[in-house]
Image (cartoon, rainbow, N blue to C red):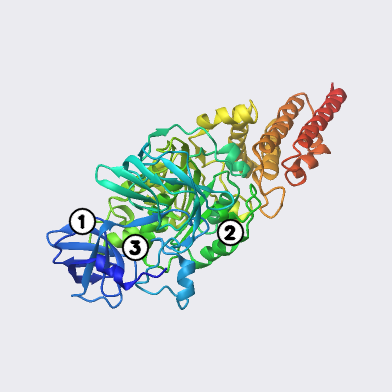
Amino acid sequence: MERKKGEYMKERIIGRVKRVNGPVIIAMGITDAMMLELVYVGEIRLVGEIIKLEGDNAVIQVYEDTTGIVPGDNVYGSGMPLSVELGPGLIGTIYDGIQRPLEEIYTISDHFIERGIRLSPLNREKKWHFVPGAIKPGSPVAGGQVIGTVQETISILHKILIPPGMQGDLISLVPEGDYTIDEPVGQVMTQNGEEQVFLMQKWPIRQSRPVKKRLLPGLPLITGQRVLDTLFPVAKGGTVAIPGGFGTGKTITQHAVAKWCNADVIVYIGCGERGNEITDVLTEFPKLVDPRTGASLMTRTILIANTSNMPVSAREASIYTGVTLAEYYRDQGFHVAVMADSTSRWAEALRELSGRMEEMPAEGGFPAYLPTRVAEFYERAGYMDTLSDTKGSVTLIGAVSPPGGDFSEPVTQHTKRFVRCFWSLDRQLANARHYPAISWLDSYSGYLEEVASWWEGEVGTSWSEDRAEIIELLQKEVRLQQVVKLVGPDALPDSQRFIIEVCTLFKNAFLQQNVFDNLDQFSVPLKQLKMLQVILLYWRKGSQLVRGGVTLLKLKRMKVLQDIVKMKMTIANEDTDQIDQLALRLERSFERMESIYA
């Protein structure tokens, strides 16, 4: 898979190095180059990208360590933008920020990635079993059209697409059989003549792949985390920010979402994170079992590992690499979830590169174009009508790591402008070992109206009302807790103390989940709604009895209450009828209490 020396003949000298400033290089004598062109610097061919042209000078950001590069070294142009290879074999692979296969590099390197190493992102020798579609020679074809399939993994039937921009009449299609990604499987007569179609295609990472139309999102991305699905849901094709200080659980929350969400494909981007966190991902994900297929989670996952000690410019490219891979599977009709951990490290890479280019800094030292870059990234999410006449989506879930947990810093504030769902992590909840440490006061979701029809049609008609009622109770409880801190709980009447009691029950029995418990680590929507309804039943009936003179102590001593607290770890997802039985027991307990105090 290593690149042959003969292939360097395709590259041309476009200039020479004038100045080296870390990962930023000034090249002079540029005669034939274009913006965002992929270039190679020096005789060891360090990968770079032209980001600025001025006269016969060019600014190049290099994705590798530039130690040893000196003025006068040649700069080679490729004639194409920085692109990724798209085809069978992406699933289950671990890449760095510029799509170099890390497992392959490890087999030929001495523990560290050698500079200038260039391996094919996709295996050139492996044969894939191609099954042609029903399309006949002579039929008109256009970009995005499906011409056949390849069974990539046990859960992914990979669709072979006509590359975007290609249009014409199909000349021929190979018969069913085994082919490598370099062997043509079809020929199309276009305006430019005959063009071949392969199992693989290339696409520039900074350009969105085309679609027919952007659709309104309406299907929820079910994560199995009750606080997310019930209180702050996100729709497939939506955008989410998970801000939180160090140690509040951003990475763990994304791990849980990646494992349990009902997306077809997961793209996990470790962007500038610490090496030990990336190591946890690389070691744990292959061991995790996909609950839908029973196979390894890697049969639907692509990992992009770009740790904090890797070149800073590659960190800047990594999120574009990840979202381009996601768009490719979206175009095949899959629902893809992208975990970017974290966009703050990506923004810091922008800041460092901007500083080296001597650009005028804006707030926090970040470049003035930070909001534009953040918007461009999240704009690539969406629920789409694709060119292949299917519906697919890309959901972007980006973690934000504000220094010191300060949500007023620029990255968090600009991210809030461009996302519609905000899962805010709370330091106090994390310190209290409350998982997930999602703040129910600072978090919000802009997808409530879109997903309400699904919840009420597929799960229960009362979802919107029940959710609104418990949110109102939680907000009342915060105000009451402030009074309690000043004068103590005894100063409150039982009617207000009961609100605090119900919210405490809700936090312990519903919001808090145990990732190590087989029953509690994931809850299906029906179980979530029934759990919420039981707690609200306790609130509604209990508040009536309190107004009728029943003491709070009597309500707290109800025997069925202990079973309600434990229901998350005692009732399986497929046994939700037991929650209905709990509700009946609660009703009978209230009826006996009413008869006594009537």
Taking the spot 87% from the left edge, 25% from the top edge, the residue there is 596
Measured as percent of width and height from the top left, residue 385 is found at 43, 35
Taking the spot 36% from the left edge, 58% from the top edge, the residue there is 316
- Mark carried by residue 566: none
Task: Please name the amino acid that badge 2 sits on.
Answer: Phe
Residue position marked by numbered label 1 in the rendering: 34
State the CA–CA distance, disc 1 to disc 2. 40 Å
Quadrant (top left, top right, bottom left, bottom right) of the C terminus: top right
Comes first in the chain, label 3 or label 2: 2
Task: Please name the amino acid that badge 1 sits on.
Answer: Met
Taking the spot 49% from the left edge, 59% from the top edge, the residue there is 127
Q: From what the image shows, is residue 5 above or below residue 101?
A: below
Asked if residue 506 lies left or right of residue 124, the reply is: right
Q: Nearer the viewer, residue 83 or 465?
A: 83
Asked whether residue 244 is in view, the answer is no
State the CA–CA distance, disc 1 to disc 3. 19 Å
Measured as percent of width and height from the top left, residue 321 is found at 39, 55
- Nearer the observer: mark 1 or 2; the answer is 1
Residue position marked by numbered label 2 in the rendering: 285
Residue position marked by numbered label 3 in the rendering: 313
